[in-house]
Image: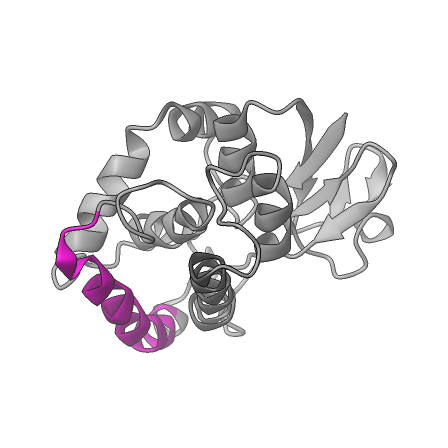
Amino acid sequence: MMQLFYAAGASSMAPHILLRELKLDFELRHVNLDQKTWSKGDYNDVNPKSYVPVLELNDGTRLTECAVILEYLASHEHRLIADYDSKQYWQQRQWLNYLATELHKNFISPFRTGNWLPNTAESKALVWQRVLPRLQFVETTFEDGRQWLMGNDFSLVDPYLFVMTNWLHRLNYSFETLPRLKAFDSRMRERASVIDTFKVEGKPHALTDSTN
């Protein structure tokens, strides 16, 4: 059975949602990212990169990188991923890479204490300056009335985008200039897979820097 190594509220939420969308058999392995541990000891023995997600396959092979894991999972049911080398496939790949490099990594502030998201006033301001124009670019994609990032059909890219909009909520960033992304976020929260993921993962650890 596949095993997903995750931390509550982290980018690993995206493959967690997709596993539930696809109704695949899997087990969850909780990771403490602050201490780099899991139930069997040192998490660096699982992933020397020291972050989540990791998907361990039935044969023991371990996949890392959120975008790669999403594509691997979506390949189990082709309604969520376009045929290889089709125009839509490359558009999906384009979005996965944009989300990973332009949004995900810009949310990770080097000026933080104890976790992966910004948790000081300075780091939150710096991250907002970086991610807002990129989010506004994504916002324009929804101007044609589409429901999901690739159009009117839910696909493998939507759980990854939802991680970003969920981080906006956690960081108390404003959706004022992002009304379509706010609507997307609301649609995602109505999906059974998302509701179940939140229930299972529970509350992520606090973002407040207790030293300030």
State the residue at coordinates (81%, 59%).
Answer: 48
The percent coordinates of residue 38 (x first, y second) are 76, 38
- Residue 128 painted magenta: yes
Q: How many marks?
A: 0
The percent coordinates of residue 102 (x first, y second) are 44, 72
Q: Quadrant for the N terminus, please.
A: top right
Residue 98 lies, with reference to residue 1, above or below; the image says: below
Q: Confirm whether residue 118 shows in the render.
A: no
State the residue at coordinates (73%, 57%).
Answer: 50
- Residue 135 painted magenta: yes
Residue toward you, 198 or 76: 76
Name the main secondary structure of what is drawn in magenta: helix
State the residue at coordinates (31%, 37%).
Answer: 188
Residue 77 lies, with reference to residue 161, above or below; the image says: above
Q: Quadrant for the C terminus, please.
A: bottom left
State the residue at coordinates (12%, 59%).
Answer: 176
Residue toward you, 23 or 89: 89
The percent coordinates of residue 21 (x first, y second) are 48, 29
- Which stretch appears magenta? 124-146
Q: Confirm whether residue 134 shows in the render.
A: yes
Q: Is residue 169 left or right of residue 210?
A: left
The percent coordinates of residue 135 (x first, y second) are 29, 66
